[in-house]
Amino acid sequence: MTGRKVLMDFEVTADSHTLAAYRARGGYRALAKALQTMRPRDVTQEVVDSGIQGRGGAAFPAGRKWQGIDPDDGQPHYLIANADEGEPGTFKDRWVLEFDPHALLESMLLASYALGVRHAFVYIRGEYDRPWRRLDAAVEEAYAEGLFGENILGSGFACDLFVFRGAGAYVCGEASSLLGSIEGTRAYPRNRPPRMTVRGLYQAPTVVNNVETLASVAWIVRNGARAFREIGTEKSPGTRLISVSGHIRKPGVYEVELGYSWAKFLHEDCGGLLCNKALKAVIPGGISSAVLTGKDAKVLTAGEVEDLTLDHEKLRAAGSSLGSGGMIVIAEGTCMVRLLQIMLRFYHHESCGQCTPCREGTGWMHRVIDRIVAGQGRPEDIDTLYHVARFNDGTTICGLGDAAGYAATAMLDNFRDEFEYFIEHRHSKFGGNLECR
């Protein structure tokens, strides 16, 4: 299958999300180990030595982020698990929240101990009802067993956790916007510097980590950084949860050892493409990552498979990224013009409006692509999309405007002929839906 496991190394059952089941598979032993035998800085160093990179999109080393906080500086510190999983095509953190919530809670306790955090938060998107209910029940179980609150496991360490439900804004997945939502203000992204590890939630030092990133910490502390380093590649250690959707026979959430063959993953583990269609393109890490064509991905047929693997360095070299782990598989016969229309509609709708280039630029691109799809496109519309995308690049506080531009330019770079055809003939060269014949 997809290599060694860190998070999905157990069989999911009707009660696998409960405290009893988690403890039966070794849960909360890492917390006991840390509280009894490790100093807070030792836990941080273990995470640093593991080399784990953020699993939310940016791939910033988690340990380096933690090192930005001095646990002995006398200030209040905050920890936030970012569970606002709003990136289209991404639903891998949902798996953790539904089936292994205590892995997240134990890891947050370890992080809180390392960072001198008294109050920790999970910010979860409001649409995630079952994951929220599972997480909320897990928090109640943990409190009932004395795993949160005062004098945890008789160590003198105290930590409380609060689950905060968002209201469905995509921009709240951006870490600084999330802070405003918790504080009760308008959830606008914040300029940096200062970094959030200097001035974050309530103007105090704050660490915000993705759910998958944090959930891996308990495994790292329990088994050691060296064991984690033995999984994956030298530059991309560990595993990634990948949610696969689109024209694929076996969609779902998979844990993949970094460095795993992309061709094997798609054609063997995921069962290949629907209707035995050829692969046209893949969006590797949510729609904010650049689309790769089948030719780029080297997975059109077994005879054309080369060495592209699922890790950060290979995806960067190919012009894209693992991003948020939301892989969308696109088969031949799909109209990329209409697909870009859907993507730009999303970005326009979800722009918070704080930054002029994003507010106006996403709307401009959306109107242009709508006009093309309506059969009223003009030859100069392609250059207009490129022009607006360039003006969005690097001119906004958060990355939403940049992502909209990257999505548009990647589509145009790879499938310009389809856009030219649509403009000239006033319709797509493909039908509306993928058909199996």
Image (spheres, rainbow, N blue to C red):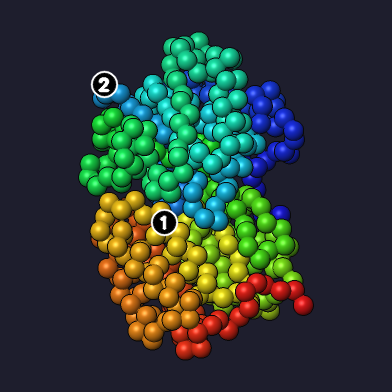
Q: Secondary structure at mark 2?
A: loop
Q: Which mark is residue 349?
A: 1
Residue sitting at x 46%, y 12%: 150
Q: Identify the residue at the far bottom of this view.
A: 424
Vertical relation: 189 (above or below) 46: below
Vertical relation: 152 (above or below) 432: above
Q: Nearer the viewer's eye, disc 1 or disc 2?
A: 1
Res 11 visible: yes
Residue sitting at x 23%, y 41%: 194
Where does residue 268 sit, x and y in percent of width and height? 72, 63
- The residue wearing badge 2 is 74
Mark 2 residue type: Gly
Question: Relative to the observer, which residue lies in front, 106 or 155?
Answer: 106
Residue sitting at x 38%, y 80%: 382
Residue sitting at x 74%, y 33%: 14
**186 displayed left or right of 377:** left
Q: Which mark is residue 175?
A: none
* Image quadrant occupied by the N terminus: bottom right
Distance, label 1 to label 2, CA atoms, is 42 Å
* Image quadrant occupied by the C terminus: bottom right
Where does residue 3 sit, x and y in percent of width and height? 66, 52
Where does residue 189 sit, x and y in percent of width and height? 31, 46
Crowding around mark 2 (Cα neighbors within 10 Å: few <14, some 14 to 19, many 20+) is few
Question: Relative to the observer, which residue lies in front, 384 or 55?
Answer: 384
Would you identify the image quadrant in which residue 384 lies? bottom left
**181 displayed left or right of 324:** left
Where does residue 353 sit, x and y in percent of width and height? 31, 53
Vertical relation: 48 (above or below) 330: above
Crowding around mark 1 (Cα neighbors within 10 Å: few <14, some 14 to 19, many 20+) is some
The tag earlier along the polypeptide, 1 or 2, is: 2
**151 displayed left or right of 64:** right
